Image (tube, rainbow, N blue to C red):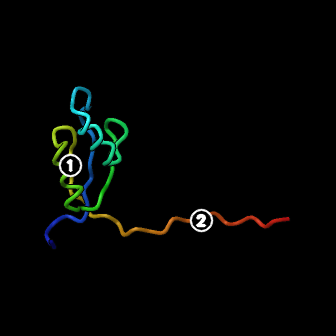
Amino acid sequence: MADEPQGLRVTWVKSAIGYADDQKRTIQALGLRRLHQTVEHQNSPSVRGMVGAVRHLVRVESVELAPPTAPKRPARRARP
């Protein structure tokens, strides 16, 4: 597992029009909403399986993912 990439960058490159509904749902499950949109996922068997199911519609690159950071919460306003 040490030689496998830490993350996958998935780019939607071909329209899903004319393909089966399960492939359209797989594109949505990967977080892709628009053609030529790119998302990054952890390298896991489930993600690799989804990518493999729609490999004719997407482009995949190996990437090193940055460590996750906690989202910044806005400062609370004082109540009058």
Give the mark toward the camera: 2 or 1: 1
Above or below residue 16? Residue 72 is below
Q: Earlier in the sequence, mark 2 or mark 1?
A: 1
Label 2 to label 1, Cα distance in Å? 33 Å
Label 2: which secondary element: loop
**Quadrant of the drawing holding the N terminus:** bottom left
Above or below, 61 relative to 58: below
Q: Disc 2, disc 1: CB below 8 Å?
A: no
Between 34 and 30, the residue placed more toward the observer is 30
Residue 79: which numbered mark, if any?
A: none
Report which residue position mark 1 lands on.
51
Q: Dot 2, crowdedness within 10 Å: few (<14), some or many (≥20)?
A: few
Residue 75 point in image, percent of width and height = 67, 66
Which amino acid, mark 1? Val
74, above or below 38, in the image? below
- As displayed, is residue 13 above or below residue 2? above
Q: Quadrant of residue 53?
A: top left
Residue in the picture at 21% in, 52% down: 61
Question: To which residue does mark 2 refer?
Answer: 73
Element carrying mark 1: helix
At label 2, the amino acid type is: Arg
Residue 68 in the image: x percent, y percent? 40, 68
Residue for point 21% across, 33% down: 20
Residue 9 drawn at (x, y percent)? 27, 53
Quadrant of the snapshot with the C terminus: bottom right
Q: Is residue 55 left or right of residue 65?
A: left
List x then y, in percent, for residue 15: 26, 31
Residue projecting furthest to the top: 18
Residues packed near mark 1 inside 10 Å, few (<14), some (14 to 19) or many (20 plus)? many
